[in-house]
Image (cartoon, helix red, strand yellow):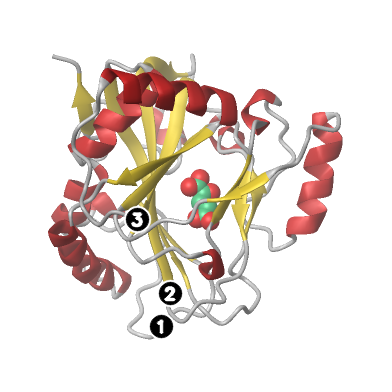
């Protein structure tokens, strides 16, 4: 795999990528994030994990600060509000450009992020249960919302990479998944039953540091244990286009970790068509 980043997108590449995203429900892009930025982000991840917040704003929820390596999956919501380098990563224009190419969006805006650290060792409490992202957003958001997932560490087949079920974006909203469950087989069975027997074909998103995958809000995905030598470190960046919005009657203060679209610190714009 090439170690150079890929800033340019030809019209032919865009058309082929958009067709693949629409068909499969995911797309694995070339390496998009420069090595120099990755190096700075790694340091800032350590700071946020230890409870040091450059902007003085803590992440959403009640993250536990620690100087010890984690033993179970760490999920820190909206660390980009706490740290300027992480903000620079999650709003990187290369992610915005690819997101626009895949969806046809004229505007790409981040509305939430998750720092995910999956420790090695293969113990329980590190899997991400099969789910569809829309299950978690359906009460508040509607329309074109999707996710970019950025590898900070080398995400190999052994390190518990995210796995996508090809074509499951066409199965509708099943509400049968659970991000927080370790029981992948039981969830798979429940999802397959609800889908009416959709063909289950898994694809592992193996990514180099700085590599990015994108997935549709209805694509079934999850991940297993990390059997590699080091932690699997990544950011899930939740994105929207102009064809999305807050559901009628919902107030931002009731939207949990989702950032108000009008608050550009929480919801940076990663791309706008000129
Ligand atoms: O990191 C993982 O294994 C899953 C992340 C996820 O569910 C997501 O990005 O939507």
Residue 122 in the image: state x and y as whole percent: 61, 78
Disc 2 target residue:
231
For disc 3, the marked residue is 1
Question: CB under 8 Å between callouts 2 and 1?
Answer: yes
Residue underneath mark 1? 69
Q: Quadrant of residue 51?
A: bottom left
Neighbours of disc 3 within 10 Å: few (<14), some (14-19), many (20+): few
Quarter of the rendering containing residue 50: bottom left
The numbered disc on residue 157 is none
Tell me the residue at 25%/51% (across/down): 80
Please state which of residues 65 and 118 is positioned toward the viewer in this rendering.
118
Q: Is 237 displayed left or right of 3 in the figure?
A: right
Is residue 118 placed above or below 270 in the rendered structure? below
In the picture, the quarter occupied by the N terminus is: bottom left
Q: Earlier in the sequence, mark 3 or mark 1?
A: 3
Would residue 144 be seen by someone viewing this image from the given angle?
yes
Residue 69 vs 273, above or below: the answer is below
The residue positioned 40% from the left and 71% from the top of the image is 64
Q: How far apart are the alpha carbons under marks 3 and 1?
A: 30 Å
In space, the residues marked 2 and 1 are separated at their CA atoms by 9 Å
- First in sequence: mark 2 vs mark 3: 3
Q: Residue at x 61, y 52 (%)?
A: 222
Q: Secondary structure at mark 2?
A: loop
Q: Specify few, some or many for label 1: CA neighbours under 10 Å numbering under 14, 14-19, or 20 or more.
A: few
Ligand 1 closer than 8 Å to label 3 CB: no
Q: Position of residue 268 (x, y in %)?
A: 22, 35
Query: Does 244 appear above or below 27?
Result: above
Q: In the shown orientation, is residue 139 left or right of residue 141?
A: right
Q: Position of residue 152 (x, y in %)?
A: 32, 61
Labels 2, 1: front one: 2
- Of all residues shown, which one is farthest toward the bottom? 68
């Amino acid at each position: 795999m090439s170690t150079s980043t890929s800033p340019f997108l030809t019209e032919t590449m865009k058309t082929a990528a958009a067709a693949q995203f629409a068909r499969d429900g995911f797309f694995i892009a070339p390496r998009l994030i420069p090595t120099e930025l990755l190096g700075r982000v790694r340091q800032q991840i350590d700071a946020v994990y230890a409870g040091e917040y450059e902007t003085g704003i803590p992440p959403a929820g009640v993250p536990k600060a620690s100087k010890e390596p984690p033993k179970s999956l760490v999920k820190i919501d909206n660390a980009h509000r706490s740290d300027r380098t992480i903000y620079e990563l999650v709003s990187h224009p290369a992610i915005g450009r690819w997101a626009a190419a895949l969806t046809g969006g004229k505007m790409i805006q981040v509305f939430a992020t998750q720092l995910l650290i999956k420790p090695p060792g293969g113990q329980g409490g590190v899997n991400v249960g099969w789910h569809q992202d829309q299950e978690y957003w359906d009460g508040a958001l509607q329309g074109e919302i999707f996710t970019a997932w950025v590898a900070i560490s080398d995400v190999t087949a052994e390190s518990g990479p995210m796995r996508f079920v090809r074509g499951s974006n066409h199965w509708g909203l099943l509400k049968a998944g659970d991000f927080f469950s370790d029981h992948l087989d039981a969830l798979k069975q429940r999802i397959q039953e609800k889908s009416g027997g959709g063909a289950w074909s898994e694809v592992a998103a193996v990514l180099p540091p700085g590599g990015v995958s994108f997935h549709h809000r209805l694509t079934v995905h999850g991940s297993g244990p990390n059997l590699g030598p080091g932690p699997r470190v990544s950011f899930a960046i939740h994105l929207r286009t102009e064809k999305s919005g807050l559901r009628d009657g919902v107030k931002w203060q009731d939207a949990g970790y989702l950032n108000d679209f009008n608050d550009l610190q929480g919801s940076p714009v990663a791309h706008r068509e000129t």
